[in-house]
Image (cartoon, rainbow, N blue to C red):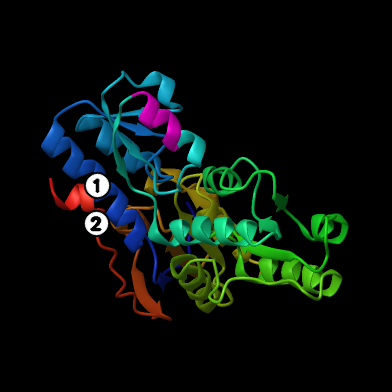
Amino acid sequence: MSVAESVTVLLAAPRAFCAGVERAIEIVERAIASRGSPVYVRKQIVHNAHVVADLESRGAVFVEELDEVPAGATVVFSAHGVSPTVRAEAARLGLEVFDATCPLVAKVHTEARRYADRGDTVLLVGHAGHEETEGTLGEAPDRTLLVQSIEDARTVEVADPDRVSYLTQTTLAVDETAEVLDVLRERFPALRGPSSADICYASTNRQAALRAVAGESDLVLVVGSTNSANTQRLVELARRAGRPAHLIEDAAGIRPEWLTGVATVGVTAGASAPPHLVSGVLDALRAHGPVTVVERVVARETIEFTMPGAVRSL
């Protein structure tokens, strides 16, 4: 490997786990400690392969749908939320449910119901097939339309242009979402939305932190799993800034050729990536020569979410 004599790592902060992810993982851990193995989890509790593997080793069983869960068993709903249909199915099967839905995702669900109940068409800005989007769409499926792009924003049709609201997936790119909303506001001057942004603080902060390092980096490494939406947005953001950027699950994903001639590496991690994976990336870089780590902090995250009542009583 041909690398610069000394490499500077610009470490973006905040990075890695957010409060919603930590809460979701703890809910599974507490359920296993209280109920024993197996505890079933619908979908990945958070979108990170390392987290899933660790919980599997301790007794969690991940399933795609509730028909894979034995009647009367214990199940955890993932941080991404579920639709009312899934909740009803869990009740029909007599499942004991612990709900790990991130409170910020739950906020979007509440808004979807409120907007639909007042007679609006709800425009949900998000990505088709993502678990969070599917759950939100399920709150008012007859009144909600998915808007995935600027092109969708230009062409979407609503029943009454004077009765239309918008919501967004919590893990979107801030700048791209703003462009979509600009188009929607131009087409629908009466458009109403939430009093506070739906894109969560963790996604916003991690994107701002990456912007603070990307401009000075020859290479950007983003730690996380490929199915993590907020992590993918970080990679896209770095590339839009004109920097080579790669998504890696962990240090093993670093390819030697990426480092050829590189003097400055920007490093960050998506909100569902464990912090120890970032430490592993730094160790891997140090193994190839002198490394100076400079942390760029754009925000301090002090948010903590309380546990659901059912979990607090365990």
* Amino acid on which disc 1 is placed: Ile
Q: Quadrant of residue 279?
A: bottom left
Please name the residue shown 52% across and 48% down the image: 132
Sequence-first disc among 1 and 2: 1
Does 90 lie within the magenta span? yes
Q: Secondary structure at mark 2?
A: loop
Asked whether the residues under the numbered discs 1 and 2 touch, taking CB atoms below 8 Å apart as contact, a structural biologist would say yes
Image coordinates of residue 61 in percent, x first then y, are 30, 27
Question: How many neighbours does mark 2 have within 10 angstroms: few (below 14), some (14-19), or many (20 or more)?
Answer: some
Real-space Cα distance between discs 1 and 2? 8 Å
Please name the residue shown 44% across and 67% down the image: 202
Secondary structure mostly seen in magenta is helix
Image coordinates of residue 314 in percent, x first then y, are 12, 45
Q: Is residue 70 above or below residue 244?
A: above
Is 194 on the left or on the right of 254, as rendered?
A: right
Between 213 and 100, which is closer to the camera in this rendering?
Answer: 100
Residue 307 is marked as 2
Between 120 and 29, which is closer to the camera in this rendering?
Answer: 120
* Amino acid on which disc 2 is placed: Met
Image coordinates of residue 188 in percent, x first then y, are 82, 70
Image coordinates of residue 55 in percent, x first then y, are 26, 37
Q: Quadrant of residue 292?
A: bottom left
Does 307 lie within the magenta span? no
| Residue 44 seen in render | yes
| Residue 270 seen in render | no
Q: Which residues are magenta?
A: 87-93
Between 249 and 232, which is closer to the camera in this rendering?
Answer: 232
Residue that label 1 marks: 27
Between 207 and 2, which is closer to the camera in this rendering?
Answer: 207
Q: Is residue 220 above or below residue 126?
A: below
